[in-house]
Amino acid sequence: MSSDAPHRPALDPAGFTALRLEEREDRLLARLDRPAVKNAIDQTMVDELHAVCAHLERTPKILVLAGTPADPQSGAKGVFASGADISQLRERRRDDALAGINSTAFERIAALPMPVIAALDGHALGGGAELAYAADFRLGTPQLRMGNPETGLGIIAAAGAMWRLAELVGEPTAKEILLAGRILTGEDCLRIGLITELVDPVELLPAADALADRIAAQDPLAVRLSKQVFHAPREAHPVIDTLAQGMLFDSDAKFDRMQAFLDRKKAR
């Protein structure tokens, strides 16, 4: 990010048990790390996702969400998240549902200042799919299996799928997933635009990094404002566009980047 931004301490990976963190100057990789239960999302993972969000709200940078990679030696398959932890979910009651435990965390992820990239391999089901829907970009593998089987468990997909999915893939496909339990393959996801790139598992994180590189090459403030303006309600436009552009027109980066463009053009 900007070199004149105040220095803030990085997150301490040792303080996390359900996530594995790798932080760089311009991005943070958060791997879901409960492989014994296929990265089922429990309260600890939700709490740690909130901690990641609190850090990125103070220190804006790109977030890359990933799961457990495949292990060719052991034959273990990759997995993003198989859903919510059913053992915890079964014991929750009305007040727990009204608290919006997962939806609150996923909404916070969606609202992060800088873009969020979800790198998806293996199962991304239920709450795992809803976490991926909250990202700005989704990349996947042919082994990806994505969907919302909640109605088969007597509940609904209440952590964002009920409205995000229709925005992402359209009403007919969203209803097939939410009401009929359709599970999408990686190829399905690419065809309907739910993911933007399909790569082999070994290329998944490099592809996510390449996308993060392209984002990081842009002006950070312009990216932040673009994300905010993009997600503003229709009635806020065009006023919010004009206000955001007014902020950027006086930024040092605008003058520096435009001058560099003109200098390159002149040199050619």
Image (tube, helix red, strand yellow):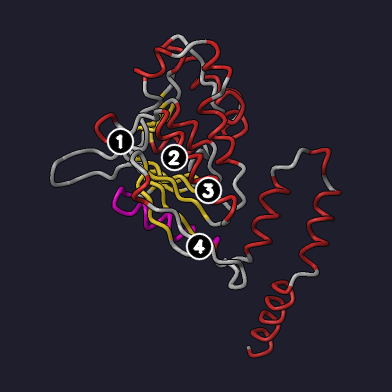
x and y percentages locating residue 37 in the rendered image: 28, 29
Q: Residue at x 37, y 23 (%)?
A: 85
Is tag 2's residue or tag 4's residue first in the polypeptide sequence?
Answer: 4
Q: Which residue is mark 4?
A: 26
Q: Which residues are magenta?
A: 200-215
Residue 48 is marked as 2
Q: CB under 8 Å between callouts 1 and 2?
A: no
Q: CA distance from mark 1 to mark 4?
A: 26 Å
Q: Which residue is mark 3?
A: 116
Q: Secondary structure at mark 4?
A: loop
Q: Where is 101 relative to 222, above or below?
A: above
Is tag 1's residue or tag 4's residue first in the polypeptide sequence?
Answer: 4
Q: CA distance from mark 1 to mark 2?
A: 13 Å
Q: CA distance from mark 1 to mark 3?
A: 21 Å
Q: CA distance from mark 3 to mark 2?
A: 16 Å
Q: Bin the neighbour count of mark 1 within 10 Å (Cα to Cα): few under 14, some 14-19, many 20 and up.
A: many
x and y percentages locating residue 53 in the rendered image: 53, 45
Please say whether residue 173 is visible from this viewpoint. no
Q: Quadrant of residue 129?
A: top left
Is tag 1's residue or tag 3's residue first in the polypeptide sequence?
Answer: 1
Q: Amino acid at mark 4?
A: Asp
Q: Secondary structure at mark 1?
A: loop
* Magenta run includes residue 1: no
Instruction: Compare residues 241 and 102 and report the one nearer the observer.
Output: 102
Residue 34 is marked as 1
